Image: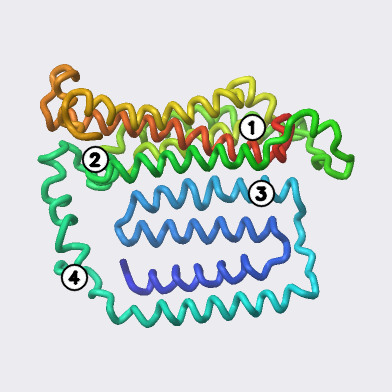
């Protein structure tokens, strides 16, 4: 990247971060934080980490902002300062300064930028870059690393997403008997979706294209930036847009709460199930090459390529349902009847 452009982006990132901390209007702070994530997306793209930039754009600038807005919808928009806040802020500032100073002491131990002999480039990274195509027939090295070479990590990361969904449900979910005893002061703010006719019609046209693009991202993640996580986030974002344009009951007519949990679990089972099949065929867990015994017209290399697509589909299921489930929980304050 051009260093002047890097400097501008870095300056804007710092400014937006400070603004998001200083703004007392939480809605405005959420929007500024979304802009901060978008700038980080540009920085990742400029550094050549396009897959990371893709994820930052979908999760950081997109879904995370919606999650914060949904939370504000059920809490409050303005920060109410308290007298004891200043001492707490000073304590946290001291902790941050000490931690930052400690981290800066390690900067001199970092290798030079792009050093081919640095520890990270001197071991497995070189093997991944030179053997990814011959081992897996996948030109996108990021996909081959995440879904094949480091498939254990990705499988457990997918499980973490599923556990996060279950945790949100367990903490926020309210039963109907509890809802009936809630006071009027705990009621949701008024929201009339009938006033959003233009948004409704626009979303009806946008959602199908978003979902088609998400499927392309999942299926084409082998050859270009993308994969199951990015595609799953976009699929979840399309359903969230559909829910925001209409209402939660309309979304639950298409995908109920039980289906959200079930499909999220099925995604984890798809990933782990592929590993179990590999063991049943006499190989190691998630050693895809052995799947050539049951996949038609494939050798050991193409079996690894096809298996990566299968596990990416599982990741997409889990991530999509987790995004929708977390949003519906936050937007409805755990009631799953109405909300943002």
**Which mark is nearer the camera, 3 or 2?**
2
Which of the two labelled residues, at mark 4 and mark 2, occupies the earlier sequence position? 4
The residue that disc 3 covers is: 69
* Residue at 14 percent of width and 69 percent of height: 117
Dot 3 crowding, Cα within 10 Å, few <14, some 14–19, many 20+:
many
**Which mark is nearer the camera, 1 or 4?**
4
**Which mark is nearer the camera, 4 or 2?**
2
SS class of the residue under badge 4? loop
* Residue at 31 percent of width and 66 percent of height: 1
Residue 118, visible in the rendered structure: yes
Which of the two labelled residues, at mark 4 and mark 3, occupies the earlier sequence position? 3
Cα separation between marks 1 and 4: 48 Å
Q: Which mark is residue 243?
A: 1
Which quarter of the picture shows residue 84?
A: bottom right
Which quarter of the picture shows residue 225?
A: top left
Q: Nearer the viewer, residue 39 or 240?
A: 240
Residue 340, visible in the rendered structure: no
Cα separation between marks 4 and 2: 26 Å
The residue that disc 2 covers is: 148
Which of the two labelled residues, at mark 1 and mark 4, occupies the earlier sequence position? 4
> Does residue 11 sit above or below 221 in this rendering?
below
- List x then y, in percent, for residue 221: 31, 38
SS class of the residue under badge 3? helix
**Which mark is nearer the camera, 1 or 2?**
2
């Amino acid at each position: 990247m051009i260093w002047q452009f890097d400097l501008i982006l870095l300056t804007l990132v710092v400014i937006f971060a400070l603004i998001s901390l200083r703004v007392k209007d939480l809605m405005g702070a959420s929007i500024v934080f979304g802009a901060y994530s978008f700038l980080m997306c540009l920085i990742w793209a400029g550094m050549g980490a396009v897959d990371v930039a893709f994820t930052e754009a979908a999760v950081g600038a997109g879904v995370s902002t919606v999650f914060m807005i949904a939370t504000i919808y059920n809490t409050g928009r303005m920060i109410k300062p308290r007298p004891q806040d200043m001492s707490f802020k000073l304590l946290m500032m001291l902790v941050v300064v000490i931690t930052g100073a400690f981290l800066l002491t390690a900067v001199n131990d970092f290798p030079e930028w792009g050093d081919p002999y640095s520890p990270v480039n001197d071991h497995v990274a070189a093997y991944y870059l030179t053997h990814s195509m011959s081992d897996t027939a996948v030109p996108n090295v990021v996909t081959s690393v995440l879904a094949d070479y480091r498939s254990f990590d990705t499988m457990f990361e997918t499980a973490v997403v599923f556990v996060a969904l279950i945790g949100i449900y367990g903490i926020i979910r309210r039963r109907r008997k509890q809802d009936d005893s809630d006071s009027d002061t705990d009621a949701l703010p008024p929201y009339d979706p009938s006033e959003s006719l233009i948004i409704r019609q626009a979303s009806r046209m946008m959602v199908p294209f978003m979902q088609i693009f998400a499927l392309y991202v999942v299926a084409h993640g082998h050859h270009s930036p993308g994969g199951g996580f990015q595609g799953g986030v976009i699929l979840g974002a399309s359903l969230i847009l559909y829910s925001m344009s209409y209402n939660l009951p309309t979304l639950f007519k298409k995908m109920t709460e039980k289906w959200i949990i079930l499909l999220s679990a099925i995604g984890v089972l798809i990933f782990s199930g592929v590993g179990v099949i590999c063991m049943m065929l006499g190989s190691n867990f998630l050693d895809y090459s052995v799947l050539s015994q049951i996949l038609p017209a494939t050798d050991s290399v193409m079996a690894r390529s096809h298996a990566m697509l299968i596990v990416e589909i599982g990741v997409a299921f889990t991530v999509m349902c987790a995004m929708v489930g977390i949003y519906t929980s936050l937007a409805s304050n755990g009631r799953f009847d109405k909300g943002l």
